[in-house]
Image (cartoon, rainbow, N blue to C red):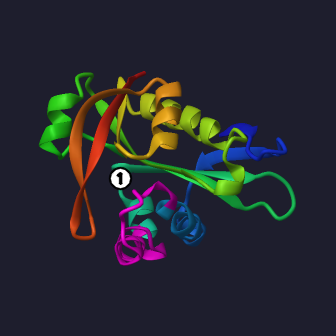
Amino acid sequence: MTTGTGSPSGGPVLVRRATADDAAELARVAAITFPLACPPSTTEQAKADFIATRLSEHAFAGYLSAPDHIVLIAETVGPGAQAVGYTMLITGEPADADVRAAVTARPTVELSKVYVLPEHHGGGAAAALMDASAAAARETGAVSLWLGVNDENARANRFYEKHGFRIVGVKKFRLGEVDEDDFVRERVL
């Protein structure tokens, strides 16, 4: 478990490994945060379809039970505690050929998802999640983390740059009927 501040007012958050009981709360946060990371050209239908198929409570139940997935959740501390963000890590060799060619430090772990509710942006929850994710990756024996991030997502790219992720390549990410351009970023642990 990791603690940190998580809201602009500096309220504390706790980062812990998510359990099966967290699937509904993770899906709630994902439905709010995923659209924020999409390029402006992404259709509402594409966003809704992705949320329904890849970020639903059922999907999270599968991620939480998969042995190669680690899901971390950031929650406010105290009465009425609620989830404010999450990360998902996937262990093992990258499946995408472009990623395999770009990422040089092995073994590696994919940082598949990093999302924080907008009212908690800038408050430290994302940094606490990032620190906990790096620690979780190290615990698997990984020497690097990699991620894909849309090339138009300036806020996310600044955050990843600040946290030591450098651009090492590019890949495609299918969203609806469109292949989006993603930077492949790598951070040596």
Q: Which residues are magenta?
A: 36-59
Residue, disc 1: 67
70 displayed left or right of 186: right
Quadrant where the image shows the N terminus = top right
Q: Is residue 78 above or below residue 32?
A: above
Picture quadrant where residue 9 is located: top right
| Horizontal and vertical percent position of residue 149 | 37, 44
- Taking depth in this image into account, of 158 and 106 the one nearest to the observer is 158
- Mark 1 is on which residue type? Pro
Query: Can residue 119 be seen in this snapshot?
Result: yes
Q: Is residue 43 magenta?
A: yes
Residue shown at 73% from the left, 37% from the top: 4
Residue shown at 46% from the left, 23% from the top: 164
Picture quadrant where residue 126 is located: top right
Q: Is residue 10 magenta?
A: no
Quadrant where the image shows the C terminus = top left
SS under mark 1: loop
Q: Main secondary structure of the magenta part?
A: helix
| Horizontal and vertical percent position of residue 120 | 70, 50
Residue shown at 29% from the left, 45% from the top: 182
